[in-house]
Amino acid sequence: MSAGPGTTSEGRATIPNNQQRPTINLPTMQEITPKELEAMKKEGKPFQLIDVREPYEVELCNIGGTPIPMGDVVERIDEVRKDVPVVIHCRSGARSGAVINALSSRYGYTNLINLKGGILAYGREVDPSMKCE
């Protein structure tokens, strides 16, 4: 089978080099550093903290907040507030980023903030005595 114009030999579609690719504008994810989070806590600013790690990870170490494992977020969405900033964290920031993208795009949340570097960065920058691994 030979590939026709606009397809690869495997039959996948291609975009010719002379055509512009569509631009997708995703909103920029808000982030907070561990030190900024600690300052928010100390200042008593209203916010919600959500930990999207698995229960066994939360048992090892935590910085407070509501534990809602990543896989349970949609069924527990009523626990995610819309009236205050919501800081979401995980181990390194990847899972929390995925949760923020999903909640923002599918459910219209605009108040979500990712803890940059996750709880590992919090341990390094704020509380070196915390052992999460």
Image: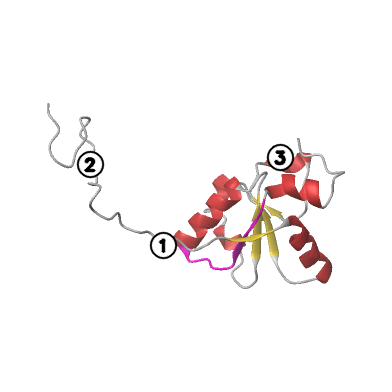
Spot the residue most to the top: 1
Question: Mark 1: few, some, or many residues within 10 Å (few <14, many ≥20)?
Answer: few
Of residue 17 and residue 54, the one placed in the foreground of this image is 17
Q: Which residue is mark 1?
A: 25
Which image quadrant for residue 39? Answer: bottom right
Which residue is pictured at 66% across the width and 47% down the height? 90
Which residue is identified by label 2? 13
- The quarter in which the C terminus is drawn is top right
Magenta residue check for 113 = yes
What amino acid is found at the position of numbered circle 2 in the picture? Ala
Local crowd size for mark 3, using a 10 Å CA cut-off: few (<14), some (14–19), many (≥20):
some
Q: CA distance from mark 1 to mark 2?
A: 22 Å
Q: What residue is pinned by disc 3?
A: 57
Question: If you read the primary sequence from the N terminus, does the residue marked by circle 1 or circle 3 appear first?
Answer: 1
User: Residue 52 location, x and y as percent?
Assistant: 63, 49
Residue drawn where x is 62% and y is 46% of the image: 69
Q: Amino acid at mark 1?
A: Asn
Measured in 3D between alpha carbons, the distance from the residue under mark 3 to the one under mark 2, in whole angstroms, is 42 Å
| Image: magenta residue range | 107-116
**Picture coordinates of residue 109 (x, y %)?**
52, 66
Percent from the top left, x then y, of residue 58?
Answer: 73, 43
Residue 53 circle label: none
Residue drawn at 65 percent across, 68 percent down = 85
Is 40 positioned to the left or the right of 8 in the image? right
Q: Residues within 10 Å of mark 2 (few under 14, many from 20)?
A: few
